[in-house]
Amino acid sequence: MYIDELKFSLWADFIERDYLDNEFKELVGDGVVNGATSNPAIFKNAILNSPAYKTQLASLGSMGAKEKYEAVAFYDITKAADILKPLFDKKDDGYVSIEVDPYLCDDANATIAEGKRIFAAVNRPNVMIKVPATPAGYVAMEELTSLGIPVNATLIFKKEQAASCAKAFERGVAKYGETIDTVISVFVSRVDRAIDATLAERGVEVALSGIYNTADIYNEIERMKVSGCRALFASTGVKGDSLPPHYYVERLLAYNSVNTAPVDTIKAYHKDGGKNKALPIPQNVIEAHFEKVKNAGIDIDKILDEQIADGLDAFKDAFKDILEAL
């Protein structure tokens, strides 16, 4: 744990081969991070822009594009899992996440098959299969956890999504008969980037909507008390210099939670960030803020629905770009 008394973990939201061989090992060894996450956009930037992959890709010959992607992605995920395994053995997280093909987000059976296949291919107990929070995804989450596979539910922007994920995990764990580690990944800063310009024009304080929306979801996850399930705060980097780089880590510090952040954000938080618990936030404070948002003419439900759709599209586009390039 990054902060033992809070059961608070800090995971690196980044995967790249040279980084895994060098800086990541240092961050893990120094107790700065105790897990890692990936997504199609992260792998796109790594595979297409880093020279570290050229040799392996050149050796893959006439493989299909998805086979090539999986060969390099599984190699990296396995490497990260092995680096993190000593933490996993000590029950200090030690997980790394890899996402299923985002184009399967509306096909439960295909998502289940893909999740099982990836987990078996990587063949490490400390790998979490990342599944988008869609109706098909909830079915897949239940089935995968019922098989003892750890799951990272991703692209959560709404409390209803989080509740559906938690219920799916609860059912899956009941079938499996033992606790399975799961996380519900709530996306934070994208909400602020979507509406802060409008709020500023209308005199409403900015850089709070993502925090309060996440706090509301955190309260729901904690209320449900599903064995092995925690809130994970994602999309916690900042754009520009209007906020401290560690803003979304410090402002979301919570008991029994994970924050996955870009490496620069982690370094800034480790250097200067506060260690005082920031959540839970009282419901009346959350509701008062969103009343101001509503009075500013913003339909927050519509914004959140748009963010869910945009997030899925972004992961699909990144995956498509990888396959086309390979």
Image (cartoon, rainbow, N blue to C red):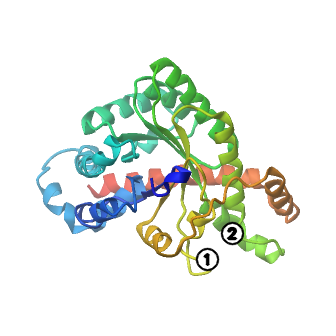
Residue at 47% x, 24% y: name it: 143
> Which residue of the protein is positioned furthest toward the right in this rendering?
295
For mark 1, does the 10 Å Cα neighbourhood hold few (<14), some (14 to 19), or many (20 or more) residues? few
Q: Secondary structure at mark 2?
A: loop
Residue at 12% x, 50% y: name it: 61
Residue at 14% x, 50% y: name it: 60
Tags 1 and 2 touching, CB below 8 Å: yes
The quadrant in which the C terminus is found is bottom left
Q: Position of residue 314 (x, y in %)?
A: 50, 55
Quarter-of-image position of residue 288:
bottom right
- Name the residue carrying label 2: 207
Amino acid under disc 2: Ala
In depth, the one of 73 and 104 nearer the eye is 73
Q: Position of residue 263 (x, y in %)?
A: 41, 67
- Name the residue carrying label 1: 243
Q: Give the vertical position of 72 relative to 119 (above or below).
A: below
Disc assigned to residue 263: none
Amino acid under disc 1: Leu
In depth, the one of 121 and 95 nearer the eye is 95
Q: Give the vertical position of 319 relative to 191 (above or below).
A: above
> Which residue of the protein is positioned furthest toward the front in this rendering?
5
In depth, the one of 224 and 184 nearer the eye is 224
Q: Position of residue 250 (x, y in %)?
A: 59, 66
> Which residue of the protein is positioned furthest toward the bottom in this rendering?
241
